[in-house]
Image (tube, rainbow, N blue to C red):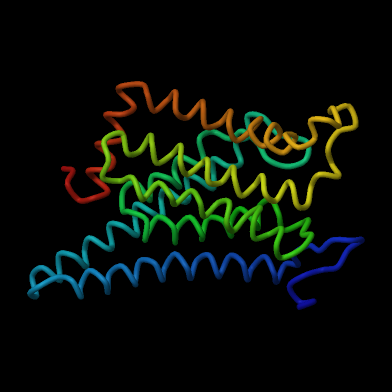
């Protein structure tokens, strides 16, 4: 365990070996998702020609999901507002994770979102780990919730609804982590009588703001049209 985690004064941090291990796990999860999906599609398909078609479709999924995750991770470094105790308003990074679920449904969406949660843990949480439960709620569950968008893929306005629900899921898990582990960081000037709402206010100050910005962008008609065209390409229906 000491190979991957370094003990500090009351907390832990990832070593270089631990960081590499997390990145390898994320890569394996992403590759396993594509492989599992290909096998699942082949089992459902009837006939050699259909099986070949589904197999190629799985390669398309791998390519589009990989690009979306890469964009999400890159944009998570573009911080418009950075909060003092963690969290930031990024350039719509959560949207690109939600897009995977919107394109391919909850099965692929949740697995890719879980892989993204590991990347986010390496990026933001690996230097300060309080406990496994804190990592679970702050990162693994919170960012995996972005895959909830996959449950709304067949609905009209599915991307918009799925994005809102997915961000709400991340917000819920992050707030639970805040209540359990981070209440000691509440500013002294914040009213003690309102301490119960402090995690809600703090997390909404960056997550909610980014969500509002993203929803406003998605409501612009040309953006909505472009998103549907990209979805058609991701599904193999575009030209």
Q: Is residue 139 left or right of residue 98?
A: right
Number of numbered callouts drawn: 0
Q: How far across and down, in percent of the image, does residue 177 sit?
A: 70, 51
Q: Quadrant of residue 12?
A: bottom right
Q: Is residue 5 left or right of residue 106?
A: right
Q: Quadrant of residue 190?
A: top right
Residue at x-position 51% and y-position 60%: 115
| Vertical comparison of 75 with 108: above or below | above
Q: Quadrant of residue 44?
A: bottom left
Question: Which quadrant of the rendered structure holds the C terminus?
Answer: top left
Q: 83 or 168, which lies in front?
A: 168
Residue at x-position 34% and y-position 60%: 62
Q: 200 or 159, which lies in front?
A: 200
Q: How far across and down, in percent of the image, does residue 170 sit?
A: 56, 46
Q: How far across and down, in percent of the image, does residue 187 sit?
A: 86, 33
Q: How far across and down, in percent of the image, does residue 218 sit?
A: 39, 28
Q: Is residue 144 left or right of residue 232?
A: right
Q: 182 or 48, which lies in front?
A: 182
Q: Is residue 214 left or right of residue 202?
A: left
Q: 146 or 118, which lies in front?
A: 146
| Vertical comparison of 186 with 40: above or below | above
Residue at x-position 63% and y-position 71%: 21
Question: Which quadrant of the rendered structure holds the N terminus?
Answer: bottom right
């Amino acid at each position: 365990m000491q190979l991957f985690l370094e003990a500090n004064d009351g907390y832990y941090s990832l070593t270089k070996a631990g960081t590499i291990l997390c990145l390898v796990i994320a890569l394996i999860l992403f590759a396993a998702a594509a492989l599992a999906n290909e096998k699942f599609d082949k089992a459902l398909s009837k006939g050699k020609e259909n099986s070949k078609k589904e197999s190629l479709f799985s390669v398309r999924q791998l390519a589009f999901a990989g690009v979306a995750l890469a964009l999400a991770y890159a944009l998570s470094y573009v911080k418009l507002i950075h909060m003092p105790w963690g969290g930031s308003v990024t350039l719509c990074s959560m949207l690109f994770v939600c897009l995977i679920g919107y394109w391919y449904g909850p099965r692929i969406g949740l697995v890719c979102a879980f892989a993204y949660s590991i990347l986010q843990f390496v990026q933001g949480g690996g230097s300060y780990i309080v406990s496994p439960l804190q990592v679970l709620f702050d990162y693994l569950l919170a960012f995996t919730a972005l895959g909830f968008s996959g449950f709304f893929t067949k609905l009209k306005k599915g991307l918009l609804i799925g994005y809102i629900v997915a961000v709400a899921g991340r917000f819920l898990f992050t707030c639970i982590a805040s209540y359990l582990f981070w209440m000691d960081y509440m500013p002294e000037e914040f009213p003690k009588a309102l301490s119960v709402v402090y995690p809600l206010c703090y997390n909404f100050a960056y997550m909610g703001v980014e969500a509002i910005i993203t929803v406003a962008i998605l409501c612009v008609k040309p953006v909505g049209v472009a998103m549907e065209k990209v979805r058609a390409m991701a599904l193999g229906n575009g030209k």
